[in-house]
Amino acid sequence: MNFFDKLIAAIERNQSLLYVALDPNCESLSFNTDESVLTVEQWQNRLESVVDQTVDVVCSYKLNLGFYQALGWQGMQLLEQVLQLIPSNLPIILDAKYSDLNSSNIFARLIFEQWKIDACTVSPYTGLDQLTPFLVYPGKAVFVLCTTANPSATILQEYPTSEQSLYLQLVQETQTWGTPEQLGLEVGMMADTLARVRKTAPERLILLEGDTSEENDLMEESELTPILAAGLNENGEGLLLPVPHCLLREENGNQAVTEFRDRINKIRTQDVQGSPTCNLWLPDICFLEHQPHRDLILQLYDIGCIIFGEHVQSSGEVFPYYVDLRRIISIPQVFHQIVSAYAEILEGLEFDRIAGIPYGSLPTATGLALRMERPMIFPRKEVKSYGTGRLIEGHFQVGEKIVVIDDILITGNSVMQGAEKLKSAGLEVEDIVVFIDHGRGVMDKLKKNGYQGHTVLTLAEISETLYQANRISSQEFDLFKESTEPTLS
Ligand SMILES: O=P(O)(O)OC[C@H]1O[C@H](OP(=O)(O)OP(=O)(O)O)[C@H](O)[C@@H]1O
Ligand SMILES: O=C(O)c1cc(=O)[nH]c(=O)[nH]1
């Protein structure tokens, strides 16, 4: 199960937004000063008892690599033992603030493949290319460090001014780096900065982090209420809070954490009262509702694939917008998700080879062929006057069944021309899979011509999602609506 689904299931099951910082940290987890120097074996027992106390009242565990490294090679063994203590249905976040030049690839492989950790924290300052090794792991996630509550960090975070601060530019920039399922934000315990981050990134999951004393301050109503008001999204969700460590030192830690969880949930319920979007406490309804395509649609918009202004389409018509899917190949983490979305459809179809319609869909067809380990061919757009002069590139046998891949269907003419070329070479084509169906009855047109169309998204779904997420105005929404009315026959 991927990080996000595991997290949602754990939040629902334990009705909790709490995580435990599960570290061999004397300041937070030892009982008294006599125990301040614990052996590695004693730490293992102590951390095991913390897991036992909290397993039914938290939604995840966060392990800070630094505390384990500080114990030397035995600390690394302890880390591997602690990873085994945590039930597999609770996601684990490794707090490593990673993403360094040269080592991102090997570190991503270690934590996601060898340690099988679900998510990790990363530092953003090496830029997207160093984060990409983490983002391309399907089902894994990162939390980008945005702010801490460290007083001396303010001069950097709020550079050049608190209104145009660096951390908010960072939040905006990361909107294009990964979907909300892949990329969350790590934010320090200051209600005002938290509120600004939430306003700038309403869909992102926020991992709230503080030092031991800031965590313990959450016990105070006067600290907890403003933090929740600032960090929760409009459905009373989207925020992961640390369990104050003082609760884990109590004799009945489970009861203490349960009471704290219930206090948070009471405030959350009050916060969302009157919200028409979510019945938070009815078990079968809309708890952190998972809309599989929403994130992908927002991501497409954020990376500039949907633009407004008059544009000539492939068919020669002029629309007041353009869907520019050529950009996806330059953003590997988005491209991965798009290939996965196509693959889900292809898995239900029978075919011998995959064919991409040039040029736009050749990278996607290649990605699918590699992902699904199936051979690929493509019909040329124009036949070369030199070389082999072939119409169809790649190897095939007459009579084979081909699934055709295109990115967008507007009139359907491009994809049908491509399919006809394949058929003229003795291949069978029935299924056509596209990423976006523009609407206007083009699927029926395919059917009348003997093809079965399948699509990941429709333009209507895209425009509705963007409008609901406040990405586009009602006027822009109407532009889509007018151009997608059925017209084709
Ligand atoms: O349904 P239609 O009206 O035919 O429009 C959709 C086609 O337009 C685009 O290709 P384009 O003609 O821009 O060529 P390219 O892929 O070579 O850029 C797109 O990749 C589709 O194949
Ligand atoms: O290839 C595309 O992405 C594309 C082609 C086209 O004609 N119209 C559009 O919006 N996108």
Image (cartoon, helix red, strand yellow):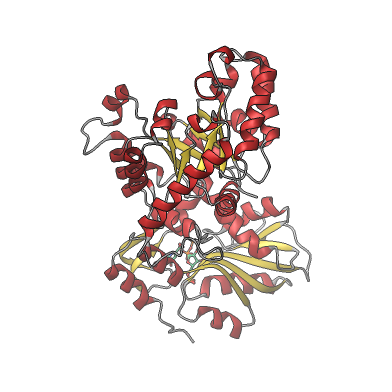
Q: Residue at x 26, y 25 (%)?
A: 155
238 left or right of 57 in image: left
In depth, the one of 74 and 400 nearer the eye is 74
Q: Position of residue 140 (x, y in %)?
A: 58, 43
Q: Residue placed at 48% from the left, 52% from the top?
A: 328
Relative to residue 36, is residue 360 depicted above or below?
below
Relative vertical location of residue 40 with respect to residue 476 in this rendering, above or below: above
Would you place residue 99 above or below residue 341 in this image? Answer: above
In the depicted view, which residue is nearer to us: 381 or 454?
Answer: 454
* Residue 304 is at least partly visible in this image: no
- Extreme-front residue of the structure: 251
Q: Residue at x 70, y 54 (%)?
A: 372
Q: Position of residue 318 (x, y in %)?
A: 34, 72
Kindly identify the residue that appears in the image at 56 percent across and 45 percent down.
59
Q: Is residue 76 visible?
A: yes
Q: In the picture provided, is 275 more to the left or to the right than 1? A: left
Residue 98 placement, left or right of 229: right
Residue 142 in the figure: left or right of residue 485 = right
- Of the pair 159 and 304, the residue shown nearer to us: 159
Residue 253, x across and y down, in percent: 56, 35
User: How far from the left and from the top, in percent, is residue 452?
Assistant: 63, 77
